[in-house]
Image: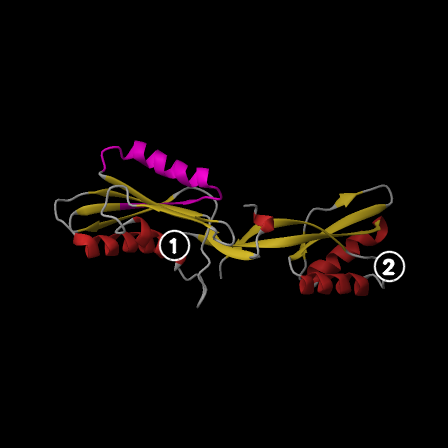
Amino acid sequence: MQEQDSRSGTYTTLAAGQDFRHELDIKRSRFITVLRRAGTEDTARDLVAGLRREFHDARHHCSAFVIGPDRTIQRSSDDGEPAGTAGIPMLEALLKRETAPGVADLSDVSAVVVRYFGGILLGAGGLVRAYSESVSAALDLAPLVRRSRLRICSTAVPHAGAGRLENDLRAAGAVMAETSYQDRYTVLRIAVPDHAAAIAAATDRILQLTAGTATLSPDGTEWVDEPLN
C-alpha cells in the first residue's frame, strides 16, 4: 500500500534512525524489546531475522508489526510461546497505544521481544502481561514523531517579486518547499495539509498577497516527519 493512496493524512511512528531497545527482567526471565520503524513487511521481518542471529541462544523471538497510514497490515507471532500469549498482546500494545488523548494511531512499527527463560514459569496470564508490558515500556521511552501527508502547491511569479512573496508567506506561517527558477519566473512551492479546505485557504492567501496576479496549482504529495507535541 502506498502512503499517498491512504485515507489517513497523519499518523504517529518512530523517529527515523536506529532501532530502539529496552529490557525488562520479570521473574528471572529477560525480555529484550527492540522497536524498528518499518514501512514495509520486508523491513519488519528483517528485524526478526537479524535478532535471531544476534540472540541465537534465546528461546523465543516473538514479534508484532503494524504498517501503513491506515494500519491495514497487522501481523504477530508467538514463536513457540503458548498460542495467544505473546504476539497478540504485543500487537495490541502497538494498536492501543495512545499518542494523544483518545488517539491511537501508531503505525509503521515492528516490535520484537527476545525472551531468555529464567526458570520460573509465568503461566498464560503472566506471559500475556509480560509481553504486553515489554512493548508498552519500550514505547514509553521511544522517540515518536507525527508523520503528515502534505500537498505541494506551486505558484510562478516574476523574479523581482519572488523574494518578497516568499517572505510574506513565511511570515504568514506557510511551510515552504523547494524553489526553482525559470527564464522569466521563480516557482515557489508551498506544503499544505492535504485536504480541500487547506488548499483553498492557501490559494486565497496567494491571491491576496499578489493582488490576484498569481495562482496556486496543487501538485503531488509528500510525507514529512514533524515533532510530536
Q: Mark 2, mark 1: which one is toward the viewer?
A: 1
Residue type at mark 2 is: Thr
Give residue 120's position: percent from left, percent from top: 12, 48
The residue beneath circle 2 is 213
Q: Is residue 84 left or right of residue 187?
A: left
The residue beneath circle 1 is 94
Q: Is residue 137 left or right of residue 189?
A: left
For marks 2 and 1, the one nearer the N-term is: 1
Q: Give me the residue at 83% from left, 61% from top.
A: 210
Q: Give me the residue at 25% from left, 54% from top.
A: 128
Give residue 119's position: percent from left, percent from top: 12, 44
State the SS at label 1: helix
Judging from the image, the colouring scheme is secondary structure
- Establish if 112 lies above or below 205: above
User: Quick one: 94 or 160, which is closer to the camera?
Assistant: 94
- Establish if 221 lies above or below 45: below
Q: Is residue 216 left or right of residue 129?
A: right
Magenta part of the chain: 32-58
Residue 102's disc is none
| Quadrant of residue 150 within the rendered picture | bottom right
Q: Residue furthest bottom?
A: 101
User: Quick one: 17 or 153, which is closer to the camera?
Assistant: 153
CA separation in Å, label 2 and label 1: 49 Å
| Quadrant of residue 172 within the rendered picture | bottom right
CB-based contact (under 8 Å), mark 2 and mark 1: no
